[in-house]
Every structure is written in C-alpha cells, then in structure tokens.
Image (spheres, rainbow, N blue to C red):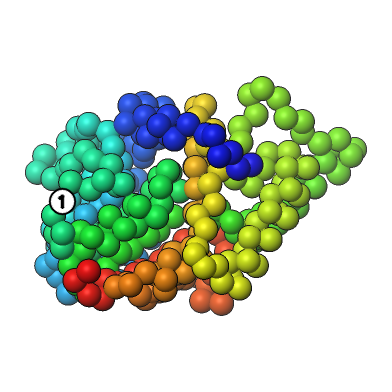
Amino acid sequence: MIDGNMNLTSVQALYRRSTEHVRGEFASNVGQAADHYRRYVHFVLQHVPARPIRILDVGCGNGWSTWLLRQEGLDACGMDLHAGPLEAQEVDPGIPYVSADLQRLPFDNSSFTAVAMYQVLEHVPDSRRALAECLRVLEPGGRLIVVGPHLLSVGLALHYVLKETVRALKSGGRWKRRGPETPFHPFGNTLPETYTHLIHHSRHTIRKLMGETPVTFLMRQPDLKPPFHADNDACYFCNPMDLVDWARQTPGVKPIRWWAVDRRGSRVLWPFSGGTWVVLEKTDPG
C-alpha cells in the first residue's frame, strides 16, 4: 500500500509526456467540458474575492477549467506539466498557459489573488512543498482552493468492501483474485484488499481527527500502467484533514472551508465522505 521506494520521477514524467488520457479530453465539445468541471468552477466562484482577480488554475489539463473561469470574468492562467497546446485553445487561442511544476512555481511572490486546483494534489510527490509554493505566490488575503478526491474516505472504503462482498456472495463465496493486469486502486481491487484498506483508512482518519503534529502526508505506490482511472495513479492519499491541519500549523494561513457546498450533510460528514473541498486563506505577507 505504501512504498517509500516508489519512483517519484516516473510520476512526474507520466503527466508531462503520457497521451494515455491522463487529462480530460472533450474534442472541443464545450458542453461536455462545462458539465465535467461545473462543480469545481462553481466552488471556485463562491470562494474567490470580488472580481476581477488573477487566478492560477493549477493542473488545468487541456485548459477547459481555465476557459470556463475566464468566461466568468476571472483573469485565469492555466498551468500543467505538459508542453501543450491546450485542447481548449481551439475554442479560445488566447488562453494563457504555463508549463511548470507545482512544486517549483515560476512566479514571483504575491503574483495571484487566488490559486485553485482540481484533482491535482493527489498526484504531486511532495504535497507539503506544493502547498508552500501556492502560499508563496498568493497575495495577502488571497485564497488557495483545493478540490479533489478524499482517498482516505472511510465511507468510500466501506462502499468498496460491501461491493466486493456482495460480488463474492453472488459468486458462491469466490472472490476476484489479483493478477498481473489487476490495477492498484486506493481502496483495493480484491475483497481482502478492500478490508485491508478499510482498516488502514479508518485508523489514519481517527489519528488525523485527533490531531497530528506535524501533519503526515501519507504516500502510496502509484500504478503507472494505463488505463488511468479512479486515481490508480495517485501517489498521495489526498484528504481534507491534512489540509486543515496543515493550515492550522502553518503561520500566515487559515482554513476557511473544508466541506462541499452542494451536498446535504457535508458539513458534518466531511471527514468520511468522498471528496476534498478545501479553501485556505493567506493572512499575512509571509
């Protein structure tokens, strides 16, 4: 599950050069792109200061989220590891784009009013450094918005346990075995694995909710074999508890929100639900 010897260079190379659908492709279908990024864009718009603002859209993939933010009046700049061009630039050639690593941002201090990312942090080898870089390029009072999966979700872990248990019962007590082509999912792919992950996720969730000092960013061995789906390729167990604790332990930053705005009960169930919806604010020049 966790491998301290994983090749983090391979993780970065995957997102720089792979053509195996590691980023959203919509063939210039604006409607499909808008549907895919709707919740992310809506969340960003609810938590940025009054417009106009300059926002860095980290891990923008093919640029559709950047295009949608610009359609809402934000001065949005896309950023990702790949060299481009962006698929969304076929609709708007003027979308600004920078090829860069989130762990080493090529921008001056206080360059942006907001930094936002969608399904990015779980793929970054050094999450702590990435967050520090985001904080550095933010203006005082600026917002860091992180949207992604919750890969320590006890709720999702229980869902996969029940799913594989039902599958085994319907097969007369036989369960799916791991083979050479079986992917490595953050919640397990076989019945024994799902139970192991449920125990792992529950234990670390309790520990994090009780408070970690300093916060521990749990890493995992990413599966670098295509097709890439369901965060098999994630190298970090992204979760909202880490981000809230990191903000509370880091001078010059405070948590503003850590639950989804469009899901009933999310304000209470956020440690166990399926997503990371976090807004942090830079409080001093730092």
List the single residue furthest toward the left. 94
Q: Nearer the viewer, residue 31 or 251?
A: 251
Q: Position of residue 180 (x, y in %)?
A: 66, 22
To which residue does mark 1 refer?
A: 107
Please report the residue visible at 44 percent of the width from the left and 55 percent of the height from the top: 148
List the single residue furthest toward the top. 180
Answer yes or no: is residue 67 visible. no
Is 225 above or below relative to 90? above
Per the image, label 1 sits on a secondary structure element best described as loop
Please report the residue visible at 44 percent of the width from the left and 35 percent of the height from the top: 8
Q: Nearer the viewer, residue 203 or 263?
A: 203
> In which quadrant is the C terminus drawn?
bottom left
- 204 sits left or right of 193 in the view: left
Q: Position of residue 36 (x, y in %)?
A: 38, 50
List the single residue furthest toward the right. 172
Which of the 4 image quadrants contains residue 16? Answer: top left
Please report the residue visible at 81 percent of the width from the left and 36 percent of the height from the top: 175
Answer yes or no: is residue 81 visible. yes
Type of amino acid under label 1: Phe
Q: Position of residue 109 (x, y in %)?
A: 16, 59
Q: Position of residue 222 (x, y in %)?
A: 53, 37
Is 261 above or below relative to 89? below
